[in-house]
Amino acid sequence: MTIEIWAAFVLAATVVLVIPGPTILLVISQAMTHGRRAVLPLAAGVTLGDFSAMTLSLLGLGAVLASSAALFTILKWIGAAYLVYLGVRLWRAAPDKDDIRLSSTGSSGRALFGKAFVVTALNPKSIAFFVAFLPQFVSSRGEALPQFLVLGATFLVLAALNAALYGFFAGRLRDAVENAAVRRRFNRCGGSVLIGAGIFTATLQRSQ
């Protein structure tokens, strides 16, 4: 793999990542609710979720999803239902009674990590995406595995940075607000975003 091919991959991956999808909408809504302290567990959950989706793709599940309408639909509806569930919970949260910032025990951090991981890893489009995307930048002149490892590691770093930046700016906005009524509006805005992301996920179509 030449440096030119790698640079082209970085550019293409960056364009793909900066367009907000269900995962980034989750990160934004959760960071707006919990503040900047949520950025690290959210970014870590996204990274591990992308790693899992990438691994499943390389093991063949991506190709199976691309050809199996039933399996694609099952994963799609699980992910959509989970996003709507999180959205409803966030909409109903009362910041004056349940200000769900990260606790000293770290349990809230684990919960945020788990949410980001589940939404990212169970997105069938993500799993199928890696099958179609990564091979485009693998040169036939070299061994495939080392190139896949480099491309995969590069994508994960970019995905982590992308999620962290989105989360940081959303969390900074949240941290600047102290009024409980305004925070409640943030919760409802974030909840609406998640419900919308769930509806969007439910409308995803399998690539033909």
Image: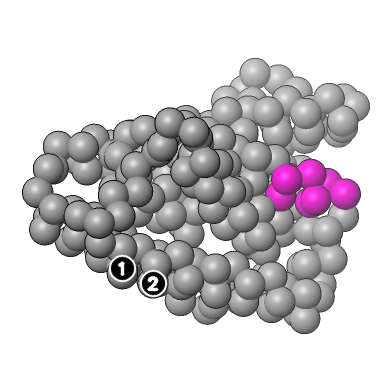
In x, y percent, where is residue 197?
A: 43, 67
Task: Pick the quarter of the image with the N terminus.
Answer: top right
Task: Pick the quarter of the image with the C terminus.
Answer: bottom right
Secondary element under disc 1, as helix, strand or loop, is: helix
Of 147 and 190, the residue lying toward us: 190
User: Amino acid type of disc 1?
Assistant: Trp
In x, y percent, where is residue 48?
A: 65, 39
Q: Which residue is mark 2?
A: 88
For the question of whether residue 92 can be seen, the reply is yes
Of 45 and 165, the residue lying toward us: 45
The rendered magenta stretch, by its main secondary structure, is classed as: helix
**CB of mark 2 within 8 Å of CB of mark 1?**
yes
Of 141 and 173, the residue lying toward us: 173
Q: Is residue 188 above or below residue 152?
A: below
Q: Who's the residue at 41% across and 37% down the image?
A: 103
Q: Who's the residue at 37% across and 33% down the image?
A: 37
For the question of whether residue 162 can be seen, the reply is no
User: Amino acid type of disc 2?
Assistant: Val
Which disc number belongs to residue 187?
none
Q: Is residue 168 above or below residue 82?
A: above
Q: Who's the residue at 66% across and 53% down the image?
A: 121
Q: How many marks?
A: 2
For the residue carrying disc 1, how many other residues have a C-alpha within 10 Å: few (<14), some (14-19), or many (20+)? many
Horizontally, residue 134 falls left or right of residue 68, namely left
Q: Who's the residue at 90% across and 27% down the image?
A: 143
In the image, the segment drawn in magenta is 52-59
Secondary element under disc 2, as helix, strand or loop, is: helix
Quarter of the view holding residue 82: bottom right
Marks 2 and 1 sit apart, C-alpha to C-alpha, by 5 Å
Q: Which residue is mark 1?
A: 91
For the residue carrying disc 2, how many other residues have a C-alpha within 10 Å: few (<14), some (14-19), or many (20+)? some
In x, y percent, where is residue 72?
A: 72, 73
